[in-house]
Image (cartoon, rainbow, N blue to C red):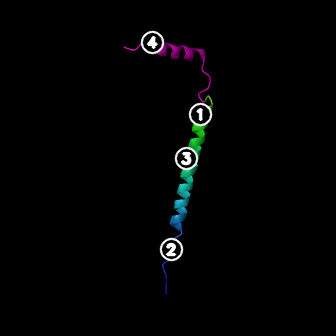
Amino acid sequence: MAGKSKSVLLPVVAAAVFAGLGRMVLQKIKADRAARQGNVTGPLDEKTRAWISEVVRTPRQ
């Protein structure tokens, strides 16, 4: 009597997909923590600082 053969492919693919998603989430969390803790934009030159100051100080109409 031939029984139903259960496919192993679907659970393996599902496990791989969930593992990949979990890895992506962990990478995102690590990147967000690093961005919060450090200066990720880099140093600003004097011209850029002056431009930002002027834009912030100028009243909008």
- Which comes sooner in the sequence, label 3 or label 1? 3
Label 2 – label 1 distance at C-alpha:
46 Å
- Which comes sooner in the sequence, label 2 or label 3? 2
Q: Secondary structure under badge 1?
A: helix
Q: Specify the amino acid type for callout 1.
A: Ala
Q: Name the residue under label 4.
A: 58
Label 3 – label 1 distance at C-alpha:
15 Å
Q: Mark 1 points at which residue?
A: 35
Q: Secondary structure under badge 2?
A: loop
Q: Does the magenta portion include 41?
A: yes
Residue 27, located in which quarter of the rendered image? top right
- Which comes sooner in the sequence, label 3 or label 4? 3
Q: Name the residue under label 3.
A: 25
Which quarter of the rendered picture does the C terminus lie within?
top left
Residues marked 2 and 4 touching at CB (< 8 Å): no
Residue at horizontal 56 percent and vertical 58 percent from the top: 16
Neighbours of disc 2 within 10 Å: few (<14), some (14-19), many (20+):
few
Residue 31, located in which quarter of the rendered image? top right
Label 3 – label 4 distance at C-alpha:
41 Å
